[in-house]
Image (cartoon, grey):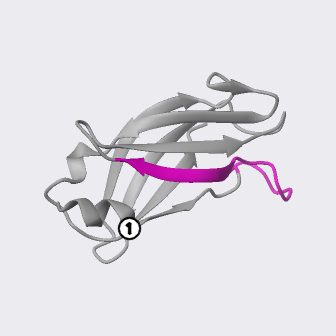
Amino acid sequence: MSSSNFNNIDARSPKSSKSKDEGNGISITSVSVKKGHPTVIKYSWAFHNKSPDFFAVLIKDVASKNVWVLDSKVSTGGHGRGGKGKDTVDISVLKDYPGKYVLLLVDIR
């Protein structure tokens, strides 16, 4: 994957799948790509007391709809405090798959 393809990452953070109330999930607040060895996505999110305890980090190819699990279990509050968290995830699995991607945080309850 050429380095320019790493700039084609958007973000989506659906609300908790168990909740019927607005805003009872996790919201992605920033996403950036840090190129190097390995190339990683740096992302941050906002959460509150009704947010899921854990989520999975997935990336989806917009054109093909292929999905890769980048991290199967992230602690919502374990990477931050005060309702904000941040983490990084390796995306070297995408090096042979150029395209436009969407970052997803998925409730795993």
Element type at mark 1: loop
Residue situated in front as seen by the camera: 73 or 102: 102
Residue closest to the far top: 78
Q: Is residue 69 above or below residue 76?
A: below
Q: Is residue 17 magenta?
A: yes
Which quadrant would residue 69 be assigned to in this image?
Answer: top left
Please say if 71 is above or below 4. above
What span is colored magenta in the figure? Answer: 16-34
Mark 1 residue crowding within 10 angstroms, few (<14) / some (14–19) / many (20+): some
Q: Residue at x 67, y 52 (%)?
A: 29
Would residue 36 appear left or right of 89 to someone viewing this image? Answer: left
- Near-viewer residue (92 or 72): 92
Give the answer, above or below, for where 101 lies relative to 43.
Answer: below
Position of the C terminus by quadrant: top right
The answer to whether residue 1 is left or right of residue 44 is left
The one nearer the camera, 52 or 6, is 6
Residue bearing mark 1: 8
In the rendered image, which quarter is residue 86 located in? top right
Q: Quadrant of residue 23?
A: bottom right
User: Where is residue 6 drawn, in percent x and y?
Assistant: 32, 59
Q: x and y percent of residue 102 in the render?
A: 45, 63
Residue at 39 percent across and 55 percent down: it is 59
